[in-house]
Image (tube, grey):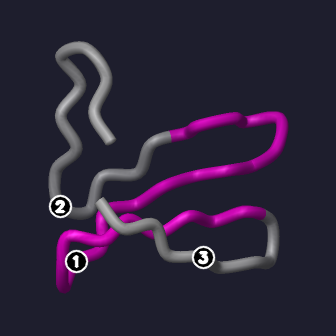
Amino acid sequence: MTSGSTTYKNGDVMAIDPALSIYIELNRTDSDFLLFKKNDLAYIRV
């Protein structure tokens, strides 16, 4: 889940599509990413 020189660190929150309010955050307990889309929670394995 990296792009160019972007490095995702523990706890980082990146805006994927502000219009859709989609954010991913590196899970603080493992290497999963959390996808926050409106009121839904989904895990994305990385």
Residue situated furthest front in the rendering: 45
**Residue 44 drawn at (x, y percent):** 45, 66
* Disc marking residue 28: 1
Q: Which residue is mark 3?
A: 42
* Disc marking residue 10: 2
In the displayed structure, does residue 38 sit left or right of residue 6? right
Is residue 27 shown in magenta?
yes
Name the residue located 38 percent from the left edge and 65 percent from the top edge.
33
Quarter where residue 19 is shown: top right
**Residue 30 drawn at (x, y percent):** 18, 80
The amino acid at mark 3 is Ala
Q: Secondary structure at mark 1?
A: loop
Q: Residues within 10 Å of mark 2 (few under 14, many from 20)?
A: some
Quarter containing the C terminus: bottom left
Q: Earlier in the sequence, mark 1 or mark 3?
A: 1
Quarter where residue 29 is shown: bottom left
* Image vertical order of residue 45 relative to residue 14, above or below: below
Q: Secondary structure at mark 2?
A: loop
Q: Earlier in the sequence, mark 3 or mark 2?
A: 2
Name the residue located 55 percent from the left edge and 39 percent from the top edge.
15
Q: Nearer the viewer, mark 3 or mark 2?
A: 3
